[in-house]
Image (cartoon, rainbow, N blue to C red):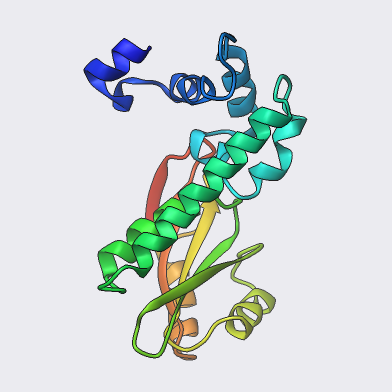
């Protein structure tokens, strides 16, 4: 696999193979194939394996020990920190950079959750937060409004089988805009990590 990586790069590897290669650093002289398959079966996709929520559940996966859980968890945190650092580099705000970061995070948070990107008064990115259980009900809209400030961006992750339409997104966007919030994007993301943009 090392030689294959040198020739073709990681794009030539399936998800379970890429995870196998990563696990070599945790478990030398161990067949990591079964562990990689167990992790993907538990979490559904490579991006979800390294998500914030998944870090708490590594030890529930068969064949994953304390050392492997620790190394994977620290790698997941470093990925997130790197993306936050890229967002906060000067120039601090750009539409393209914000959308790359939102797609990265949306693949990692649970379904039906909302990602909020926070900015300061001069549109410089500060940090982010995640709200649970997105829907178009009044309670959720009020909760979302209560935890955001004017000008902050809202991104929604929907499960792959969700039936949201662009009209529904538009209505929600107009409702939030009345309160100076911005519905930036709605993504339908399958359990395997495939993304369909419903609203942007």
Report the residue at 67% width, 34% height from top: 69
Question: Vertical placement of 45 versus 83: above or below?
Answer: above
Give whichever of 176, 44 is nearer the camera.
Answer: 44
Q: Is residue 140 visible?
A: yes
Q: Is residue 199 visible?
A: no
Give whichever of 153, 135 is nearer the camera.
Answer: 153
Q: Residue furthest left?
A: 7
Give x and y (percent) for residue 111: 59, 51
Place residue 8 in its image quadrant. top left
Answer left or right for 86 relative to 106: left
Give x and y (percent) for residue 131: 62, 67
Quadrant of the rendering where the C terminus is positioned:
bottom left
Report the residue at 37% width, 69% height from top: 88
Report the residue at 66% width, 63% height from top: 132
Place residue 143 in its image quadrant. bottom right
Give x and y (percent) for residue 184: 39, 70
Answer left or right for 2 relative to 154: left
Give whichever of 177, 83 is nearer the camera.
Answer: 83
Quadrant of the rendering where the N terminus is positioned:
top left
């Amino acid at each position: 696999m090392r030689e294959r990586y040198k020739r073709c790069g990681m794009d030539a590897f399936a998800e379970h193979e890429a995870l196998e290669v990563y696990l070599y650093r945790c478990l030398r002289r161990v067949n990591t194939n079964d562990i990689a398959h167990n992790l993907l079966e538990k979490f559904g996709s490579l991006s979800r394996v390294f998500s914030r929520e998944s870090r708490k559940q590594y030890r529930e996966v068969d064949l994953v020990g304390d050392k492997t859980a620790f190394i994977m968890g620290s790698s997941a945190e470093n990925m997130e920190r790197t993306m936050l650092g890229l967002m906060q580099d000067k120039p601090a705000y750009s539409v393209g950079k914000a959308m790359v970061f939102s797609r990265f995070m949306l693949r990692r948070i649970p379904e039906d959750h909302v990602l909020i990107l926070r900015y300061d008064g001069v549109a410089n990115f500060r940090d982010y937060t995640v709200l649970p259980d997105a829907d178009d009900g009044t309670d959720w809209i009020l909760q979302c409004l209560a935890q955001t400030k004017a000008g902050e961006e809202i991104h929604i992750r929907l499960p792959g089988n969700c039936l949201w339409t662009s009209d529904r997104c538009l209505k929600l966007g107009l409702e939030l805009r009345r309160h100076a919030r911005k519905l930036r994007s709605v993504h339908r993301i399958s359990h395997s990590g495939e993304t369909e943009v419903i609203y942007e």
